[in-house]
Structures are given as structure tokens and as C-alpha cells.
């Protein structure tokens, strides 16, 4: 029965894509599930006003699913990473818009309507709305003076801790409290809407803490421990796959060079019924390239033609480039990297920066992979001469990405996309 349902769903998904040029399941997940999981809609009043101020009439005509801003699955720690960059350079790595989206995420994840019943939670509810970083940190200490509070430890780990080691210690303290609150609310969740909301909040808090602890382990070089923590988290909360924890897992498995397990994860998540990402598409391309890249020669390929394995690798690269054409120039170091933002626009420059920041080392580790990418990536646009009008494997490239990336990336650095005479896609850097 399950297989029959999946088959029917795939047929309907294929029909819907052919008729409307977009994924039905992705639209449903974006429109109905994502607001519960911290996603932000660029069509909200705040963001729409900023878009209209830029006079971008085209972006207003985009479909709802095209200009969604997603939380970066591998976002850095503010205190231990972003702030250290500011101390050294005197520059702000995050835009106000990006930080405001994070504040909305935190209020969605870590608060609920019954917070006023507990003094510490009431303080933290105000703290997550506070714009001043020092005021937030002070409020978290005030909450801890009253009672143990998991979200207060989360805030201190994210913003006050100046090293990953300090952040990990604070997250471990948060974990003890978070697990206790989760078990208590789990028993009471069916007693009414208020208890259900509390349990949903406690679930979000627990998942967030465990994920960040796994990321701490990864950053501190305990990669195998991080992989185990991520796998356990995905098994414990299988319905929260929209949090994209599998992208953290993929990066850690690539660091271990455990390519068989990487392929197994892709087999589960690189599916027509699930939303795509640069991580999914480019990791699939990397695995295909790995099979042929060490012996690949463009001169030999032009004489004898491409073998089946080489053709599969090239097709995987073309697929990845169609999804996000910004990535190759970062991987090939034709454009310099900056620190990734806390939110990304899928298929946009912000996603390309975030992907390359963490995955460039994995491409360099596979002999010849970057050479194969260099030789083949521009060929994508021979198949898709007008990517803003018609796609091949994905819906046409959205024209609203420039406006969204302008808000997400520091003002001196963002890219936009425009077709040129030969039909290729050119990615240009614009200084504001």
C-alpha cells in the first residue's frame, strides 16, 4: 500500500511539474510546513516593503515558492565566530535584515503563549525580541538568576561564548534542562492546546540544542561523534526532516571521506518529492565526478567522446549548475568568499557562499573534481539558453534573487544574474 501511494504521488508530482513548472510537494512544504520550522517568507509585509522600495516589479510577480529565505543549516556561532571576525576586522559580517530574520526564528522556536507563567521564560520572551546584543545577554543572566532556563543557556552559548569550547559547555547545561522540560511536557501534551504548544516549543528547543552540540563536536574535530549525534537526532525526530539536519550530516560524512554513507543519505533525500538544495545537487555531482575525475582529460574526451561514467558526471554537474549557477565560480576560486549569512536564498548567491564555505575543501580533496567542473559547468547553458524563461530539470531561474540577496549579504558584496548574447548565464559582482 505504501509503495502504491508513493507511485501515485510521483505520477501526480510529474504531472504537476509539467503543467505548472514547479514541484507540488515543494510548494506544500514551503507554504504550510516551513512557517512552523523557522522559514521566512520574503512576501511578508516587512520584506515586501523593502522589496518595493527597491522598485523591483519583477520580484512581485514571482511565485510564492521562488523567493523564500531559509535558515542556513550550517550557520556559524555569533559569539565564537561572527563576533571574532568583527573584533579582528571591524566589519559586520551580518546584515540587519539577516539578524532580524534570526530574531523571528528564535521567537518561533523558543517561545510560546504560556511563557508568562514562568518568570524566567517571560524574561527570555522579551530577550529574543531585544535588538541590542548586550541587553539580550543581560536578560539571559537575569533569567538564570531566577531559575534554570534552557533558552537562556542557548542565548549565552550563541552570543556570549567567545570560543566553541565555551559554547559547548553552555549547550550541555541547556541539554540537561531541555531534556527534563521535554519529558514533562510530553506527558501533558494531550491535556489541551496550551500544553501542546509547550511541548512543541520544548521539542524545538531540544532539537536545536542537540544539533548545535553536534556542530560543536564537528568544529572541534570530533567528527565521528558528530555523525553519531546527527544520526541519533534524525532517528529520534524523523518528522522534523524539514530542519535539514541531513545537510549537516552530509558535510560531516564528506569530511570523513565516507562516500558510501554519503551516497546512502543522498538516496534518501535527493528525491523528486523533496525540495532540493545546492548541498544535495552539488554533493551528488561530486560523487559522480569522483568516479572519473582523476583520469579525466578534456583533450582525450574530445577525441574519443565521453564514456558512460563521464557522461553521468557531466550531467550531474549540469543539473547542479542549473539549480544554482553561482556555485562554480566560488568553487573554482574565481570569486572570493565571505562569511556565510545566517539565512540563505535557495538558488541564490547567498546559498552558493554558504555551500562553498563548508564544501570547497571536499571538492579539493577529490583529485581532478574541480578540473572536471571547470571544463564542463558552462555547458549547462547550451542546453538552457534562456534560463530565466525556461528550465530543464528545474523551474526557470527566479529573477527575484538579486533583491533578496541584496538584503542578506553585506552591501559591498552580492551577485546578480543576467543572460548574455551567447545565451550563457553571467554572474557579476556589484558594488553598492
Image: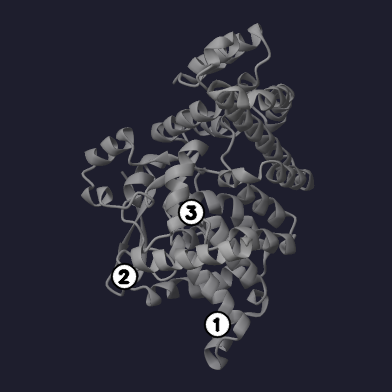
Query: Residue 298: which disc?
Result: 1
Query: Around disc 3, counting alpha carbons within 10 Å, would you say few (fewer than 14), some (14 to 19), or many (20 or more)?
Result: many
The span from disc 2 to disc 3 (Cα, nearest Å) is: 21 Å
* Mark toward the start of the polypeptide (1 vs 2): 1
Q: Is residue 235 above or below residue 20?
A: above
How far apart are labels 1 and 2 at the CA level? Answer: 26 Å
- Disc 2 is placed on an element classified as loop
Q: Is the residue under label 2 in contact with that under label 1 (CB below 8 Å)?
A: no
In the figure, is residue 385 to the left or right of 56? right
Q: Residues within 10 Å of mark 2 (few under 14, many from 20)?
A: some
Residue 42 x %, y %: 36, 41
Circle 1 or circle 3, nearest the eye: 3
In three-dimensional space, the C-alpha distance between marks 1 and 3, rounded to whole angstroms, equals 26 Å
In x, y percent, where is residue 416? Answer: 34, 54
Residue shown at 56%/40% (left/top)? 75
Q: Considering the numbered disc 1 on the image, is that residue within a helix, a strand or a loop?
A: helix
Q: Position of residue 129 (x, y in %)?
A: 45, 20
Q: Residue 16 vs residue 160: left or right?
A: left
Q: Name the residue furthest top.
A: 146
Q: Earlier in the sequence, mark 1 or mark 3?
A: 1
Residue wearing tag 3: 352
Classed neighbour count for the residue bearing mark 1: other residues with Cα under 10 Å, few (<14), some (14–19), many (≥20): few
Name the secondary structure under disc 3: helix
Q: Which residue is mark 2?
A: 386
Instruction: Say above or below: 145 vs 365.
Output: above
Front residue of 136 and 190: 190
| Labels 2 and 3 touching (C-beta < 8 A) | no
Amino acid at each position: 500500500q505504501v509503495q502504491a501511494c508513493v507511485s501515485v504521488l510521483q505520477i501526480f508530482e510529474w504531472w504537476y511539474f509539467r503543467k505548472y513548472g514547479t514541484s507540488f510537494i515543494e510548494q506544500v512544504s514551503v507554504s504550510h510546513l516551513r512557517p512552523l520550522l523557522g522559514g521566512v517568507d520574503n512576501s511578508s509585509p516587512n520584506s515586501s516593503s523593502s522589496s518595493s522600495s527597491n522598485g523591483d516589479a519583477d520580484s512581485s510577480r514571482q511565485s510564492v515558492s521562488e523567493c523564500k529565505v531559509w535558515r542556513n543549516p550550517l550557520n556559524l556561532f555569533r559569539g565564537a565566530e561572527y563576533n571574532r571576525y568583527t573584533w579582528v576586522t571591524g566589519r559586520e559580517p551580518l546584515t540587519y535584515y539577516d539578524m532580524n530574520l534570526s530574531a523571528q526564528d528564535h521567537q518561533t522556536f523558543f517561545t510560546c503563549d504560556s511563557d508568562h507563567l514562568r518568570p524566567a521564560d517571560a524574561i527570555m520572551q522579551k530577550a529574543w525580541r531585544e535588538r541590542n546584543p548586550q541587553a539580550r545577554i543581560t536578560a539571559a543572566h537575569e533569567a538564570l538568576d531566577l531559575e534554570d532556563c534552557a533558552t537562556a543557556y542557548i542565548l549565552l552559548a550563541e552570543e556570549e561564548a567567545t570560543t566553541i569550547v565555551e559554547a559547548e559547555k553552555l549547550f550541555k547545561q541547556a541539554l540537561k534542562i531541555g531534556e527534563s522540560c521535554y519529558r514533562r511536557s510530553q506527558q501533558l501534551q494531550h491535556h489541551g492546546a496550551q500544553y501542546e504548544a509547550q511541548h512543541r516549543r520544548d521539542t524545538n528547543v531540544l532539537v536545536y540544542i542537540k544539533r548545535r552540540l553536534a556542530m560543536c563536536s564537528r568544529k572541534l574535530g570530533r567528527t565521528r561523534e558528530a555523525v553519531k549525534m546527527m544520526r541519533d537526532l534524525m532517528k529520534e525526530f524523523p518528522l522534523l526532516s524539514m530542519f535539514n539536519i541531513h545537510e549537516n550530516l552530509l558535510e560531516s560524512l564528506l569530511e570523513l571521506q565516507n562516500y558510501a554513507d554519503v551516497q546512502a543519505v543522498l538516496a534518501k533525500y535527493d528525491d523528486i518529492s523533496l525540495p532540493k538544495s545546492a548541498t544535495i545537487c552539488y554533493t551528488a555531482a561530486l560523487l559522480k565526478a569522483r568516479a572519473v575525475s582523476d583520469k579525466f582529460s578534456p583533450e582525450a574526451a574530445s577525441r574519443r567522446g565521453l564514456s558512460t561514467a563521464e557522461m553521468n558526471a557531466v550531467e550531474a554537474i549540469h543539473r547542479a549548475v542549473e539549480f544554482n549557477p553561482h556555485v562554480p565560480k566560488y568553487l573554482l576560486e574565481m570569486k572570493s568568499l565571505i562569511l556565510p549569512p545566517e539565512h540563505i536564498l535557495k538558488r541564490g548567491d547567498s546559498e552558493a557562499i554558504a555551500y562553498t564555505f563548508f564544501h570547497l575543501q571536499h571538492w579539493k580533496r577529490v583529485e581532478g573534481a574541480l578540473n572536471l567542473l571547470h571544463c564542463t559547468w558552462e555547458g549547462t547553458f547550451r542546453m538552457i539558453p534562456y534560463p530565466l524563461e525556461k528550465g530543464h530539470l528545474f523551474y526557470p531561474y527566479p529573477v527575484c534573487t538579486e533583491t533578496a540577496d541584496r538584503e542578506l549579504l553585506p552591501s559591498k558584496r552580492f551577485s546578480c544574474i543576467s543572460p548574455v548574447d551567447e545565451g550563457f548565464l553571467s554572474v557579476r559582482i556589484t558594488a553598492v
